Image (cartoon, rainbow, N blue to C red):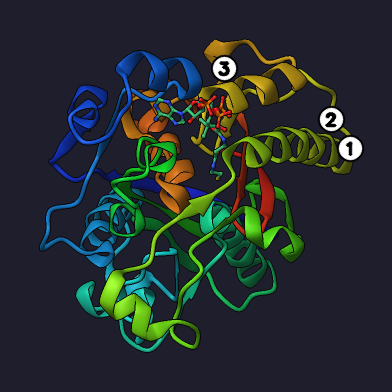
Amino acid sequence: MKYSRITGTGSYLPEKVLTNHDLEKIVDTSDRWIVERTGIRKRHVAADDQTTCDLAEYAARRAMQAAGVSAGDIDLVIVATTTPDQVFPSTACLLQQRLDIHGCCAFDIQAVCTGFVYAMGIADKFIRTGSARCALVVGAETLSRIVDWSDRSTCVLFGDGAGAVVLQASDEPGILSSHLHADGSYESLLRVPVGVSQGYDRLKEEGAYIEMKGNEVFKMAVNTLGRIVDETLEANGLEKGDVDWLIPHQANIRIINATAKKLKMPTDRVVITVAEHGNTSAASVPLALDTAVRDRRIRRGELLLMEAFGGGFTWGSVLLRY
Ligand code: COA
């Protein structure tokens, strides 16, 4: 089998919705500012007793049902998340337990907003090399837990959710290429500067929240995503305009539009969910994919380009024939 191919998609959004008008009551902001600068109108937020694994489980079950596979068929579980339920076991192992999958390789990937793209690239390599035949790849986040709800420059941007795909070995294309990058020297522009081996006491006492230099992140995201698009097209001998659908990371409508322009793609060929979901980090690309698959915009045989950019910085793309 030469390729790994998506055979099912699924997603889940928590019930609770926070609109821009709700945020106007929490911080000094306005619906108008948020819509103009980001394109976001609302975001979903996990209930207090809902965890990342809860969200992941819903999305995973939907993807498995769409693919027509059962727990016994899955031989690789990867969860991309920055907001795991526990320090360990990994959320992938917790999800494996929930789904009654036993014995196969299961691990988390932490590449922040690029996490799902990383996870797809890795799963593809497992399948192409014959190490796995049926992978469950999930992006799931409860970003609301690491958002500083008193910081208007970040709290308006993020949301919770999960998306999943089943990737199976196939003679039909499939993932055509993946391109994964990182440059850790940009750490200070976007981070949660506390973890297990650094500042753990502070984490317990004060919590740990996203810090971001939004303006600088914005410029880097636009330039880097422009470059990854060129890299992906060149690696596959494609021209601008050959791609049927752009499925971008949903951080900011202005970043999405800049990448679409670079690809010469009309807006109606770009899957845009940022208005309804906000930035759900590793969940954003699979959530957008599942949305457009289920409303039948995306059809079998079409060429999809997924791209993402996130903390690290990390960035990457996956080109695939759906
Ligand atoms: N409501 C109202 N005003 C706000 C605000 C909010 N929620 N957040 C910031 N402002 C203010 C700022 O204080 C600033 O005021 P000042 O000029 O009086 O100092 C002004 O708006 C402009 O701030 P600036 O940060 O320059 O705005 P911007 O156009 O860069 O937009 C972001 C801010 C965060 C929307 C934008 O930079 C962005 O999207 N960056 C990328 C974020 C991202 O994608 N991160 C994740 C990567 S995966």
The response on whether ligand 1 sits within 8 Å of label 1 is: no
Is residue 41 visible in the rendered structure shown here?
A: yes
For disc 2, the marked residue is 238
Determine the residue positioned at 39% across, 22% down. Answer: 34
Instruction: Count neighbours of disc 1 (C-alpha within 10 A) and say few if under 14, some if 14 to 19, many if 20 or more.
Output: few
Q: In this view, does 30 lie above or below 8?
A: above
| Of the image marks 3 and 2, the number of the one nearer the N terminus | 2
Q: How far across and down, in percent of the image, does residue 46 sit?
A: 19, 51
The response on whether ligand 1 sits within 8 Å of label 3 is: no
Cα distance in 3D space between marks 3 and 2: 17 Å
Which of the 4 image quarters holds residue 104? bottom left
Determine the residue positioned at 38% across, 89% down. Answer: 103
Instruction: Count neighbours of disc 3 (C-alpha within 10 A) and say few if under 14, some if 14 to 19, many if 20 or more.
Output: some
Q: Using residue 225 as the reference point, say whether residue 240 is left or right of it.
A: right
Question: Looking at the image, which is closer to me, 244 or 73?
Answer: 244
Determine the residue positioned at 69% across, 50% down. Answer: 316
For disc 3, the marked residue is 269
For disc 1, the marked residue is 234
Q: Are marks 1 and 3 in contact (CB under 8 Å)?
A: no
Q: In this view, does 148 lie above or below 23?
A: below
Name the disc covering residue 117, or none.
Answer: none
Cα distance in 3D space between marks 1 and 3: 20 Å
Is residue 273 visible in the rendered structure shown here?
A: no
Q: How far across and down, in percent of the image, does residue 163 sit?
A: 37, 49
Q: Which amino acid does label 2 sit on?
A: Leu
Q: Do the residues labelled 1 and 2 touch (CB within 8 Å)?
A: yes
Q: In this view, does 291 lie above or below 182?
A: above
